[in-house]
Image (cartoon, grey):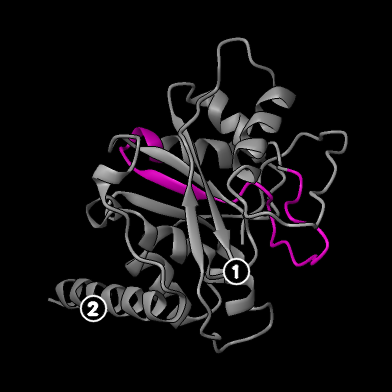
Amino acid sequence: MKARVKKHLAWLVDQALCLFVSFITGVRPKRAAALSFDTRQKVYYANHGSHGDFVLVWISLPRRWRIHTRPVAGADYWLTGRFKRFIIQQVFNALLIPRNSDNPRAITDQMREALEAGDSLIIFPEGTRNIDDQTQLLPFKTGIYHLAASRPDTEFVPMWIHNINRVLPKGKVLPVPLLCDVRIGEALRLQEGEGKEAFLERSRNALLALAPHDPRPSAPLPALKEGGERHE
């Protein structure tokens, strides 16, 4: 009985949260027929400017796709309080990872196993929130490549989130009502023989192509280091 009550409460919170976020941002679920890819499990990857990012990605997906979609989130942040634990585990069924792990392969294995179980994932390849007003997109961590290499048939879907950093700035609790936009690009996958640097650049450029015109520069690509993604 307790599990049933918790499940019902999670469903109610999900509905209320989606309605609230849709109201203050104007973002609505997309129709499946309007998207150029099918319902098979995907990795949705987006720019990262706020703790509210994955919620916008979530509510932008067709409603019936959400039940099989899990945001990848940092366990050290989301497990620090009962309410946050309930939201991230019961409402969103997130895949929680250790952000400061010294074993990036284990994180890749977690995500690969979720995909093999039939779930889709929401990830943020920048690895941390971009709070630099002068930079449009941070360099990608290499975790997205290692995930693609472990599941070469998996499609990766870029999604650009516009304006959410102004709705929920870092350090703020109450959101500011502002119109946001979520742009969904064409799915891509790791090509045969494609190296790490080439895939990271191609997937990053696919995401940048969805961004509205912005005079801010994109962060230059530094020499790449091995390691998994860090998520917030």
Q: In the structure shown, which secondary structural element does the residue marked by tag 1 occupy? A: loop
Magenta highlight on residue 12:
no
Between 139 and 186, the residue placed more toward the observer is 186
User: Where 182 falls versus 33 (above or below)?
Assistant: below
Which residue was labeled with disc 1? 163
Q: In the structure shown, which secondary structural element does the residue marked by tag 2 occupy? A: helix
Q: Residue at x 74, y 55 (%)?
A: 136
Left or right, 33 with respect to 27, comes to left
User: Where 197 falls versus 183 (above or below)?
Assistant: above
User: Where 188 falls versus 58 (above or below)?
Assistant: above
The earlier-in-sequence mark between 1 and 2 is 2
Considering the image in quadrants, where does the C terminus appear? bottom right
For the residues labelled 1 and 2, say whether their Cβ atoms are less than 8 Å apart: no
Q: Amino acid at mark 1?
A: Asn
x and y percentages locating residue 81 in the rendered image: 51, 81
Considering the image in quadrants, where does the N terminus appear? bottom left
The residue segment tinted magenta is 114-139
Residue farthest to the bottom? 174
Mark 1 neighbour density, 10 Å: few (under 14) some (14–19) many (20 or more): some
Q: Residue at x 52, y 25 (%)?
A: 150
Which residue was labeled with disc 2? 12
Q: Amino acid at mark 2?
A: Leu
Q: Residue at x 62, y 31 (%)?
A: 145
Residue 198 figure quarter? top right
Between 73 and 177, the residue placed more toward the observer is 177
Residue 132, label in figure: none
> Magenta residues: mostly which secondary structure?
loop
x and y percentages locating residue 212 in the rendered image: 63, 55
Magenta highlight on residue 127:
yes
Q: Residue at x 49, y 52 (%)?
A: 183
Left or right, 79 with respect to 194, comes to left
